[in-house]
Image: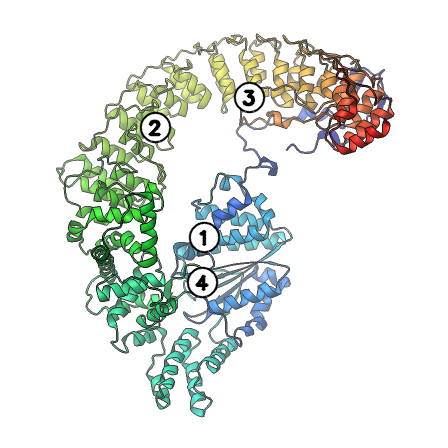
């Protein structure tokens, strides 16, 4: 939407209707006796024209500013759906509520109160950081503070995120954090949707793959757009996220804190973490839990309530000793109280002190003690710990239950919910893990996790896993994955033996089989989908899977896996090779164990065609490298393939260009897709390999060649060209548009590629389907130096395309160095007056396309381009300049352009300007004496009749996206100010002249999308006939009555007040009343009859 009209800047704002023949100029009045020369430089349109002298062209290539009405952002609900994820509140919900007598102390701590004190924000920039040992109770405290904030801080917007290292990927990453925080911000403050950068959210869907960089930027924009709103944010367990990601997040938060203080925005953040890793944040309030009197009292309160061993002297001594030995670690106190409670319940009160003395004071040592206290159900314990540690994703309680039972009992064990209720499963897991794992307390899809992240730390970082995996000697993780692979493999075998293969011959059978399996055998889906995952992880740890791959029942696995794939595109044919499947699922470590001569370049009947394309599509560079490495097994040491394999960069961070959503089409070659992915090493490998069967001169069904595919991408164009040409590609091959490789190189402005191709003998004058030579492409799209390079090699500068346009036309359309290019061509004596097949010169063409600048106009004028040259339609440069910046329009007038010339339709520049609602240009023409009573020869409509309507009755084509300000027609107004119509009348425009339909300007003013009483009053004041009927017998009153705008009533009333006769009927015998569009107009007209 355009900004405020210049009509309301300075001088008269024309706020009231125009009366009589006087127009308020701010400093004088204008009457009919004044001439056009008298009007010059007065504010009769609301401002002076003098500033036009200082207007300059906007810089070409300048980025257009975003405005709210462009509608670039997706709907808010779509954005919110893309940010949501299932586990978004899982960690918060799983934290036990603080005991009734605990945590309240923090609300009175000086650190907490300083954080809330707005007078101290310069000291801490809105940050409070709570730190404590593992298991100290930080998360419980954070949940308490968050709940208190939501109850007490009603004037603030509260948002939060609790990291969870035991959860899904989004629960333990800043990507998940930013998604959650953005979702909460936009839900609570929907207005922030308008401040988001459209470039970051344009085109997103519900399943958008967000990058952390985009999310961070969007979050920063929401904070910067808070204005007077206040936000308080709580982030728990920073130590449970990747350290580098947390450092980036804290850096961003620090910047936001500084900006918020500077801008007076209320932005407060409460963080909680362990003491390590240490991240410097000078401006903050820090609160350390250890040694806090209130925190120590929380442990006492917990023991008083939960350790039910009576109130004897012994009991109180035990509680006191627990508190001292806990050293502020709440988790230790909780576990020990459970152990002592069991002793007390067994009647062993006399052993409480002894047991407490034997329990290690260190939390990790306590875990060791719990795991080794007895050997009961040791196999269950080991398997339970391994599953919770190394499962691909957290298992549901029923999945873990049957995974353990099936391995112990060597059977699948059908789930009968009457015999095995969910609470029994929870108790089994608690028992099997010796209390170190639990079912999460979430309503939707609960999973099994360790009771605290310190359990995982003990098992993996403190070598605690070896305590229970006594026989292990090597890589404990790999051995565990090998064990879990066996569990999955055996479970599937047991199922097949006991129940037969899953039927999936039809869609109905597939749905039934999936439902039955999920309901009765909840571990089967995981076992099928992850047996190869665990095998791959074991292979990574140097536990050979060669024998396993030999006996792996591929056909049966494909059948089972298809059952559990909801989307058909993810299912495989029965002929899919193991190599292809390993490539698609990114199990690269298993690839070397595949025997046989199959090549990764062999095309199969699967979604991605070849194994190499499957690995590229799913974005695993390691798997791609493993495939290439396997290809070199039988190659001699001197083979180039070894060097290419070593050259491949496994660590390169890049997204696949072909992406997961692509589907291989046989009509396109293997090399087409490899080039499309922009990986030159793989392309070179495929071309060099005897197994790839690549046709370097392929042409797709759409006419695409290897060169045209490479040209579409953003990689090193010269390197791709050299690779293809050096390997025998046809240098003169033409694409669907007839462009040769030299044309593409010129188009891209790649000097190295141009030089190389010219050395190779490329045809410098070969034209494409539009008659453009390489030099023409260089002129339009690249820089002057590439033009010089081609000209120096003999390129013809006088060439014209199939439309008869010279290179000067191309230079005028260029977005870069257009003036320098023109001088270069003019120095080569290119004909400046040459017209194309439509009668355009380079000047008029640039004006028509809206790409002219003052510099272009000046250069072409100085070299002989006529300022009044007309095209085949009689259009002058001045008329075409309506597509351009106002300053160019004025430049042509100052150069002496004829302002009253008319085209073949009888239209002058003024008539066109009025039709387009180009107010500034119309004003400029009137000021320069343009004839005002002009009309077109086709409809006989005058400029005045167009000036009083809000319709745009003529359209000029303007090239989309051109950077000159004021270029697009959208920049013109939808209606003109009444002052334009007044000026036309003063200049001599006839008020009652009719067009071919018999309609007058007053008839058009009344028949308006947005009828205005101002226009009607203006015309009546200048003598318009209020009852003048058109060829249909309809007066202006008929048209006013037919409008459904709110102003229609005022217009009807004005016409009647000024003499309109309501009872007149048209040629069909109907009065104006029968055309009334609204009940209000109908009632008004009825009152006159």
Gap between marks 2 and 1, in whole Å? Answer: 37 Å
User: For the residue carrying disc 3, how many other residues have a C-alpha within 10 Å: few (<14), some (14-19), or many (20+)?
Assistant: many
Q: Position of residue 318 (x, y in %)?
A: 42, 86
* Mark nearer the N terminus (4 vs 3): 4
Q: CA distance from mark 4 to mark 3?
A: 61 Å
Residue under pointer 2: 709
Between the residue at mark 4 and the residue at mark 2, the CA separation in whole angstroms equals 50 Å
Residue beneath label 4, please? 442
Placement of the C terminus among the 4 image quadrants: top right
* The disc label shown at residue 141, or none: none
**Which tag is nearer the camera, tag 3 or tag 2?**
2
Q: Nearer the viewer, mark 4 or mark 3?
A: 4
Report the disc number at residue 85. Answer: 1
Q: Cβ–Cβ below 8 Å for labels 3 and 1?
A: no
The first of marks 4 and 1 along the sequence is: 1
Of pointers 4 and 2, the one earlier in the residue sequence: 4
Q: Are marks 4 and 3 in contact (CB under 8 Å)?
A: no
Q: Residue 1035's spot in the image, x, y percent?
A: 79, 19
Q: Quadrant of residue 853?
A: top right
3D distance between C-alphas at marks 3 and 2: 30 Å
Point out the frontmost of discs 2 and 1: 1
Q: Is residue 419 above or below residue 1001?
A: below
Which tag is nearer the camera, tag 3 or tag 1? 1
Label 3 secondary element: loop
Could you say which quadrant of the image residue 1054 lies in? top right
Q: Is residue 735 above or below residue 639?
A: above
Neighbourhood count class around disc 4 (C-alpha, 10 Å): few under 14, some 14–19, many 20 upward:
some
Percent across and percent down for residue 286 are 51, 66
């Amino acid at each position: 939407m355009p900004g405020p009209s210049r009509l309301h800047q300075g001088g008269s704002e024309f706020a009231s209707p125009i009366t009589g023949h006087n127009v308020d100029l701010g400093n004088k009045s204008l009457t009919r006796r004044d001439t056009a020369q008298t009007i010059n430089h007065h504010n009769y349109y609301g401002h002076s024209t003098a500033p036009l002298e200082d207007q300059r062209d906007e810089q070409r290539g300048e980025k257009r500013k975003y405005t709210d009405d462009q509608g670039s952002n997706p709907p808010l609900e779509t954005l919110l759906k893309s940010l949501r994820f299932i586990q978004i509140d899982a960690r918060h919900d799983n934290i036990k509520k603080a005991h009734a007598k605990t945590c309240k102390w923090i609300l009175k701590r000086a650190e907490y109160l300083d954080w809330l004190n707005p007078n101290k924000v310069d000291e801490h920039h809105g940050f409070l950081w709570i730190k404590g040992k593992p298991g100290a109770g930080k998360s419980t405290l954070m949940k308490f503070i968050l709940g208190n904030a939501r109850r007490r801080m009603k004037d603030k917007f509260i948002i939060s995120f609790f990291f969870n290292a035991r959860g899904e990927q989004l629960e333990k990453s800043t990507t998940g954090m930013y998604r959650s925080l953005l979702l909460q911000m936009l839900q609570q403050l929907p207005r922030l949707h308008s401040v988001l950068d459209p470039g970051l959210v344009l085109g997103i869907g519900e399943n958008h793959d967000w990058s952390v960089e985009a999310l961070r930027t969007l979050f920063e924009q929401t904070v910067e757009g808070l204005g007077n709103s206040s936000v308080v944010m709580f982030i728990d367990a920073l130590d449970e996220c990747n350290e580098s990601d947390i450092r980036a997040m804290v850096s961003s938060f620090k910047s936001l804190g500084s900006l918020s203080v500077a801008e007076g925005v209320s932005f407060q953040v409460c963080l909680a973490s362990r003491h390590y890793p240490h991240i410097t944040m000078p401006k903050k309030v820090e609160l350390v839990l250890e040694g806090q009197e209130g925190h120590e009292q929380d442990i006492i309160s917990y023991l008083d309530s939960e350790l039910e061993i009576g109130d004897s002297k012994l009991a109180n001594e035990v509680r006191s000793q627990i508190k001292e030995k806990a050293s502020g670690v709440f988790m230790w106190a909780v576990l020990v109280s459970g152990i002592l409670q069991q002793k007390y319940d067994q009647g062993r009160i006399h052993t409480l002190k002894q047991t407490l003395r034997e329990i290690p004071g260190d939390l990790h040592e306590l875990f060791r003690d719990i795991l080794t206290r007895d050997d009961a159900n040791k196999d269950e314990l080991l398997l339970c710990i391994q599953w919770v540690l190394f499962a691909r994703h957290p298992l549901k309680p029923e999945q873990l239950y049957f995974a353990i039972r099936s391995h112990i009992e060597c059977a699948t064990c059908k789930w009968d919910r009457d015999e095995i209720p969910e609470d029994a499963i929870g108790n089994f897991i608690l028992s099997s893990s010796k209390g170190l794992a639990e079912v999460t307390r979430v309503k939707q899809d609960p999973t099994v996790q360790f009771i605290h992240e310190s359990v995982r730390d003990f098992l993996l970082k403190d070598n605690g896993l070896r305590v229970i995996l006594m026989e292990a000697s090597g890589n404990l993780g790999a051995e565990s994955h090998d064990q879990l692979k066996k569990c999955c493999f055996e479970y599937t075998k047991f199922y097949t033996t006991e129940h037969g293969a899953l039927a999936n011959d039809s869609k109905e059978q597939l749905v039934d089989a999936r439902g039955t399996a999920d309901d009765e055998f909840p571990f089967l889906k995981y076992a099928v989908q992850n047996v190869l995952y665990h095998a791959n992880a074991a292979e990574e740890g140097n536990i050979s899977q060669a024998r396993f791959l030999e006996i792996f029942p591929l056909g049966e696995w494909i059948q089972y896996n298809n059952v559990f794939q909801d989307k058909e595109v993810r299912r495989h044919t029965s002929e899919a090779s193991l190599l292809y499947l390993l490539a698609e699922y990114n199990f690269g470590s298993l690839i070397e164990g595949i025997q046989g001569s199959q090549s990764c370049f062999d095309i199969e009947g699967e979604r991605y065609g070849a194994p190499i394309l499957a690995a590229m599509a799913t974005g695993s560079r390691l798997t791609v490298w493993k495939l290439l490495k396997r290809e070199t097994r039988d190659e001699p040491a001197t083979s180039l393939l070894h060097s290419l394999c070593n050259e491949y960069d496994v660590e390169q961070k890049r997204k696949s260009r072909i992406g997961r959503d692509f589907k291989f089409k046989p009509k396109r070659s293997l090399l087409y897709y490899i080039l499309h992915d922009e990986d030159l090493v793989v392309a070179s490998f495929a071309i060099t390999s005897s197994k790839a069967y690549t046709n370097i001169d392929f042409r797709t069904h759409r006419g695409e060649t290897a060169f045209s595919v490479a040209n579409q991408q953003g990689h090193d164009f010269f390197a791709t060209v050299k690779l293809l040409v050096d390997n025998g590609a046809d240098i003169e091959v033409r694409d669907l548009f007839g462009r040769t490789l030299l044309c593409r190189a010129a188009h891209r402005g790649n000097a190295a590629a141009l030089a190389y191709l010219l050395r190779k003998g490329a045809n410098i004058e070969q034209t494409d389907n539009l008659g453009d030579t390489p030099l023409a492409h260089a002129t339009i799209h690249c820089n002057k130096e590439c033009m010089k390079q081609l000209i120096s090699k003999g390129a013809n500068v006088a060439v014209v395309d199939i439309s008869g346009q010279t290179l000067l036309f191309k230079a005028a359309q260029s977005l870069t160095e257009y003036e320098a290019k023109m001088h270069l061509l003019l120095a080569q004596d290119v004909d400046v007056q040459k017209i194309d097949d439509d009668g355009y010169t380079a000047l008029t063409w640039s004006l028509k396309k809206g790409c002219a600048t003052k510099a272009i106009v000046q250069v072409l004028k100085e070299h002989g381009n006529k300022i009044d040259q007309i095209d085949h339609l009689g259009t002058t440069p001045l008329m075409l300049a309506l597509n351009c910046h106002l300053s160019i329009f004025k430049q042509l007038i100052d150069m002496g352009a004829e302002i009253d010339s008319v085209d073949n339709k009888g239209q002058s520049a003024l008539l066109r300007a009025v039709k387009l609602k180009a107010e500034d240009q119309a004003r400029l023409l009137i000021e320069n004496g343009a004839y005002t009573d002009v009309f077109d020869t086709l409809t006989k409509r005058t400029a005045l009749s167009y000036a009083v309507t809000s319709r745009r009755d003529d359209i000029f084509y303007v090239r989309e996206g051109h950077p000159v300000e004021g270029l697009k027609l959208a920049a013109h107004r939808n209606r003109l100010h009444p002052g334009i119509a007044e000026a036309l009348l003063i200049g001599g425009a006839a008020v009652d002249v009719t067009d071919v339909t018999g309609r007058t300007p007053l008839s058009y003013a009344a028949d308006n999308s947005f009828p205005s009483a101002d226009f009607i009053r203006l015309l009546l004041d200048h003598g318009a006939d209020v009852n003048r009927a058109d060829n249909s017998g309809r007066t202006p009153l008929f048209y006013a009555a037919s409008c459904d705008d709110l102003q229609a009533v005022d217009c009807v009333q004005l016409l009647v007040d000024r003499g309109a006769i309501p009872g007149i009927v048209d040629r069909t015998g109907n009065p104006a009343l029968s055309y009334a569009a609204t009940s209000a107009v109908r009632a008004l007209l009825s009152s006159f009859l």
